[in-house]
Image (cartoon, helix red, strand yellow):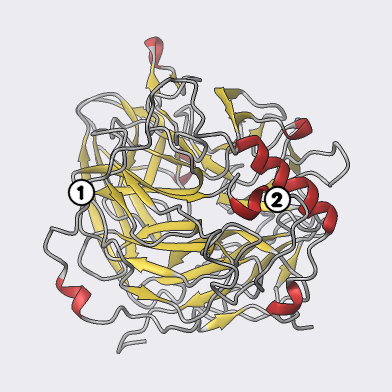
Amino acid sequence: MHRRSRAARASTIPAAWAAAVWPALAAAVGCLGCTSQAGVASPPEPVHSDAQALSPFVARPLPYAAEPGWRSRDGEDVYSMGLGLADIDGDGFKDIVVANGNDMTKQPIVVYYNDGTGRFPPEPSWSSADADYNTGVAVGDIDRDGWVDVAVSVGPREPGTVKLGHVKVYRNRGGALEPTPGYRSADGYASVGCALGDADGDGDLDLAASVALEEWYSPGPARIYENVGGALSPLPSWKSARVDHSFGMEFADIDEDGLLDLAVAMPGVPIFRGVLRDGGVISLPREPAWTASESIQVPMFLDAGRLGASTGLVVSYSDFGAGGARAGGARRSGAPGRGAAGAGAGASSTRFEAYAPERQRGPTWRSASAGWGAGVALADVSGDGVLDLIAGRWGPAPPPNALGAPLQIYLGLGGGFTREPVWSSATMTVQETIALADLGREALQSATETFRIEREQAVITLSRPVIEQIDEIRRNGAPVAPRDVASLPGGSWVSFAQRLRPGDEVEVRYSYSTELDIVETNWDTSNFIYYYRSSSR
């Protein structure tokens, strides 16, 4: 069955949801700019990178068609959000994992299996037996059995009740996900994002969860569930001291000290930096080591990668508390996917921003174009060796004013990006999550990187942000078993179960691609793939 038209979808929003969930959250976070510190101003005007010489690749069209090359067809009124790319069935090709339901209705997790050429059926190949308000997705081998598991965050509570969400895990049983989650956190909250990473540096994947809402729409701490022997703890082993509404999150070695840090999309975009304590214990302090300058905007999604001379963050923002987002029960004035209807006085002022946490608290770059931000991803899609920004939005204005925007690419300029996008899709959608991979494995190249360790550390980070496959790791000439390291599908960091010591030499041989396809989940319509186009494909 095909989905309804976008115009028809505009009338399907439950009134209870419109009056309860998002307006309450908007009210809760609407005073984020009302800081208690007297005289604190908005962030300083960023240093833009437009003065730098543009890449020669900007003169030629980017290798993506304006219309998607694949669209899912998975039923009527399906609301997709979370996205993961991972080889679920063990055939060597990445499959597409999607979390459906969002804040609208209970729906299943679905997987589209790769046919071995980078193509996918329009209907899901697998669906979970359970249904939830599924939001975020994180993929990785949690139980260390060689198969990729799927972690999912569950979102806003049912309107009119005190029922809360959680995080859960579908374990991979030899190439097939279990039909219902084998793990579910024991505590309750509404989450719209989760991330896998080795928070304690012991060589396995711990699960972090954001907290958009706790009971009665109150804010809550971000949290981490520790992996002990391949099993996640039912209750969090770590909670942030900062209590606020949080959304996306990511593990990365942002300060480049060989320990993973956790960046959280909550006001101030706090970074909790990994610390090596006496006795060799690695942990995350509960207080952030860095926060961005105060802003009235609410961060939604983020990504980390090499921006110029250091590792930086890109962040998308929303207008919670502005315009229609504050008006409980208001109807949408524009149909999803129809673009700028209803914009104008209610137009969003939020922009994409980049930060260099090792240099300053204010943004180093800000997009010229504005709109309610959604998924962001860093990858080199122009082929010049510099990271570009692939970014999505819900629309040009806060809901319910206008919904629907094109996918955009901002060309990387080292420390920042072009202020205006150099490529935009022709299709307008309410975008959610973005991920990239060479889905057909048609342009794989091999690379080897060698790391000479100068201090005790747990993590190394490869120079390319999108890794198709880690082929071999050697430490001081001896092979390291896959079970003795932790990494993520497509991710660039590797965490070691046995601590790296000064004098060690680590060699990593891996596969990467210069021809990345872009996968996008959408709230209002089908999910998309924009395939990389080249003369060889």
Which labelled disc corresponds to residue 188?
Answer: none
**Residue 190 makes an appearance in the image:** yes
Task: Give the residue at x 80% y 53%.
Answer: 17
From the image, tell me which residue sits under label 2: 327
Quarter of the image that includes the C terminus: bottom left
The residue most toward the top is: 278
Question: Of the residues under marks 2 and 1, which one precedes in the sequence?
Answer: 1
The residue most toward the bottom is: 535
* Mark 1 neighbour density, 10 Å: few (under 14) some (14–19) many (20 or more): some
Q: Is residue 280 above or below residue 72?
A: above
Q: Nearer the viewer, residue 114 or 7?
A: 7
Could you tell me the amino acid type at mark 2? Ala
x and y percent of residue 131 in the render? 81, 56
Quarter of the image that includes the N terminus: bottom right
Label 2 residue SS: loop
Nearer to us of marks 2 and 1 is 2
x and y percent of residue 156 in the render? 74, 45
Q: Is residue 297 above or below residue 536?
A: above
Task: Give the residue at x 65% y 55%.
Answer: 324
Task: Give the residue at x 55% y 82%.
Answer: 70
From the image, tell me which residue sits under label 1: 308
Label 1 residue SS: loop
The residue most toward the right is: 161
State which quadrant residue 255 falls in: top left
x and y percent of residue 62 in the render? 30, 78
**Residue 155 makes an appearance in the image:** no
Q: Nearer the viewer, residue 333 or 129?
A: 333
x and y percent of residue 2 in the render? 75, 83
